[in-house]
Image (cartoon, rainbow, N blue to C red):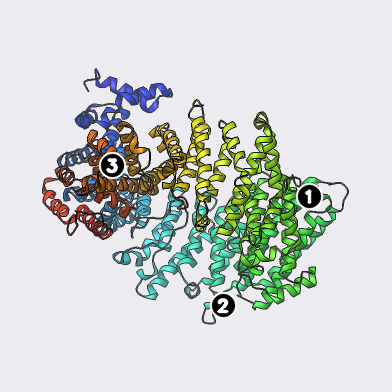
Amino acid sequence: MSSMESLAQLEVLCEKLYNSRDSAERAHAESTLKCFSENSDYISQCQYILDNASTPYALMLASTSLLKQVSDHSLSLQLRLDIRNYVMNYLAARGPKLQNFVIVSLIQLVCRITKFGWLDDDRFREIFKEATDFLALASQDHYLIGLKILNFLVMEMNQANSAMTLSLHRKIATSFKDQFLLQIFQISLTSLHQLKGEGNFPVADDLRRVPISLALRCLSFDFVGSPVDESSEEFGTVQLPASWRPLLQDPSTVQIFFDYYKVNDTTVSKEALECLVRLASVRRSLFVEDPARSQFLSHLMSGTREILQTGQGLADHGNYHEFCRLLGRFKVNYQLSELLSVEFYGEWIGLVAEFTTKSLLSWQWASNSVYYLLSLWSRLVTSLPYLKGDTPSLLDETVPKITEGFITSRINSVQPSSDLDNPLDNAEGLQDQLESLPYLCRFKYESCSLFIINIMEPLLQAYTARSRLPAPGDVAELSVIEGQIAWMVHIIAAILKIRQTVGCSQDSQELFDAELAARVLQLINITDTGGHAQRYQELSKQRLDRAILIFVQNFRRSYVGDQAMHSSKLYARLSELLGLTDHLVLLNVIVGKIATNLKCYAECEDVIDHTLALFQDLASGYMTGKLLLKLESTKFIMSNHSRENFPFLDEYRCVRSRTNFYYILGSLVFMEDGPIKFRTFMEPLLQIAVNLEASADAAFRTDAVKYAFTGLMRDLRGIAMATNSRRTYGLLFEWLYPSRMPLLLRAISLLTDEPEVTTPLFKFMAEFVLNKAQRLTFDSSSPNGILLFREISKLIVAYGSRILLLPNGTDIYARKYKGIWISLTVLSRALCGNYVNFGVFELYGDRALADALDISLKMTLSIPLSDILTFKKLSKAYYGYMEVMFNNHITISSVLNLDTSTFVHIVSTLESGLKGLDTGISTQCASAIDSLAAFYFNNIANITAGDNPPSPAALNLARHIGEFPSLFPQILKTLFEIIIFEDAGNQWSLSRPILSLIMISEQMFSDLRAQILASQAVEQQQRLSQCFDKLMTDVTRSLEPKNRDRFTQNLTTFRHDFRAK
């Protein structure tokens, strides 16, 4: 502590670090004290602080600094053992007097050291015995510390750490699980039993919470090496080892958690329920005999029955939610026949039904929890057909009541002022709520459909009556009606989404489907008539139309289109009710609704997007697409796709929808052969283009012209996306080239500093030059590929030469980087599209290629590496461009003609990309480095006396490497570090440049090998040296494909053997 006058000064700084409200003061303290966590020389000073400091904040600093040192630095084995032993003795001697946050920090430190040293020395494993020694002491404080050590040890062992490879973490976790986890779980149960009564000392809250938390951590352990998705509340089966069987078969194990649920501490009761949820999820095969499993199930049902009878603890939301999850697990892990075999099943199922009904009545409070209850009931219903025997399931009486309760609760939930946090606005929440409903409704479909119709009919009558009124009347009342109808439409849509035949025949199900569908199809005619046609701005009307679109989607999948069943029963009934004789007539109604929405919802982006999603689904089906072309409503849309007919095209908030709209129309146009129909379809766009071409340069700066141009680019991009064949692409190419291309060049030249113009233009070009499905295949005598690239080059050069001159504004990404990365994407796609013979340009002295490469390189060099790595889209475009440059154009690219420092900078960015977390970028960098190294090997390192002299590009590369000889060795070192120490998902890609670099210089490889071996423990060096020897077995000095594959296999073996301890 030479930089500080005394320990007292350090304590003052620590106080400021953890307690000061002044950010500058905190930052100063952090800057001054960070040496303790970054420099290993300060480890002894941390011990001095722990021994002598009087404030808890100084102790906290020492503890957290040691934790960071242990996590981030490779400390010697003896030093780690010394720190561990010191902390354990410190906790034993001074632990009871310390603040809780200091105790927790010290325990985390000792657990982290234990995990990191688990496979290095058996002395680290003595922590379990030392923790149990704490439990044996008479002091309540020591007992609590012992439990906390075990608690944090289980947590540390179960949690992956960024400083440790995933495979090593799993190896340590498995070893810990096999050796100690069962004993720790037994200790938690023993503690719970001891503390249940009065015990030897009064029970504090912490003494109840810590053992229950420890039990939960044990049951939540990753037993099979496949961690649960933390973002999901649901999890699969708990794979307890067979050695845990006797403990689970002991009735007291389940009972102790039910006993602790009754404790008047919501933290304890909630964690007790979480433990029970996991016990209810234990794999079935753990119980070898059926009686043992039945007894375990009976005990769980008995405990839940008591909670259902008394309602104890369920007023707390956390308890309530976990209890619903517990009930939901019964049918996930047990069969209906097993539930029926429990003696008190009848009473239990009745209580669960009553509980579910009450939960539905208090929906707002329990909305996220009821999902588990409905899921339980749907699983019970779907398993009924497989039930053998005569034992009554009692579902016939309970399920209809629950179904009706759910529907009623949804109707009653609609309030006049429910615009904020309305469940109808939450698509994911709606899906969760309605996921189980179809199975419940179809269980007793006849009575359920009648119940729904009886609710729908009065609502439809009231809604129809309101449409005939000259004035809107009570708007709040109308909003409630629309909200209630929207819920009913969502419910009917959910029912029609699932087709099954439990409870009644297929034909009768189709008749009930028709009855329900008829009410919604009847509604379609009402929503856009009379007074309702003036309400498109109202949120309740928008929610209703979204519900109708979801219904149409689900109904279409079942009864219209390629995969649909054309049911005579359904259409016969629809014909009687509404005159809809077949799916073609119905399709006309659907497209009519699509057209109405697109006309009327000019400002509601959400409804427009839902409408276009439905339209796209219809157009993308082969049969439905062909059917659409026969409909008058479709012909109207395709003939009148102007902003006068569809005002949303003129609305700025819907600009993104334009591309999708024209993608759909383009798909329909291209289904029909013939350029005449295409040219007719393009007439409105042609008129816009002609008007823009006639505008003066000064007019291009006006909002009207800019908006017209960007709209045209978005529309053309949608049409380009729809071209999936040589024929369809040719139609668009001929329309665009050469007459329309000058307009694009003019816009990019005049409006370089307007990203709202350049972005849609370049995004259109990125789509237009993309050779997907080999659509850019021109005749052998056609120059179109070359001509297209020349136009691309003009655009890139015009943009790049101007954008580089512009100053960096406050939002540099929006103003500059976005345009640069999209233009790089355009060029990359053109360079690797395989439709241009690039040798032609140099042969005939055409500068198009050279100029495009030159200006694109200047644009990339204008961006600092830190910014490239910060912005994800920029990063992907940059590395994609570099891969194309090094792979396809290394001999003619400008990269090798640069000065050495710039060349080294570019290659260094590739090395930085290798180290990144994005596997795609890492693969692109590996490919670029492989191409560079292979070019060096083939043209310089492997050249013989009889070969042709090196090319200018090869000589340039040799000059760069001569001036910076450490470039290749550094990259090789980075690649080996990734292979050895990281869990790379692209090992095959990384192996390619490694071989190319080794082939360049065997001395370079030998030096790296010696360097890596020297960094390893002495006792490991001989084994690791043998791993290196095997790496080059049967590998010759060539880059032939077979030799590469052999090396890749050897590298996989090398990595496995090297990492084995």
Query: How many numbered circles does the render carry?
Result: 3
Q: Quadrant of residue 1011?
A: top left
Quadrant of residue 880 in the image? Answer: top left
Say which residue label 3 marks.
Answer: 954
Kind of residue indicated by mark 2: Pro
Residue shown at the point (68%, 68%) measured from the top left: 448
Q: Is residue 639 left or right of residue 15?
A: right
Q: Quadrant of residue 1008?
A: top left
**Marks 2 and 1 in Cβ contact (< 8 Å):** no
Write down the residue under mark 2: 392
Between residues 231 and 716, which one lies in front from this camera angle?
Answer: 716
C-alpha distance separating marks 2 and 1: 46 Å
Counting other residues with Cα less than 10 Å from the Cα at mark 1, is it few (<14), some (14-19), or many (20 or more)?
some
Q: Earlier in the sequence, mark 3 or mark 2?
A: 2
Residue at image point 44% right, 68% down: 297
Label 2: element kind: loop
Give the alpha-carbon distance from disc 1 to disc 3, as whole Å. 78 Å
Nearer the N terminus, badge 2 or badge 1?
2
x and y, in percent, of residue 745 in the image: 58, 37
* The one of 1046 and 31 positioned closer to us in this rendering: 1046
Residue at disc 1, secondary structure:
helix
Q: Is residue 813 visible?
A: no
Q: Which residue is mark 1?
A: 478
Relative image position of residue 285 (x, y in whole percent): 36, 70
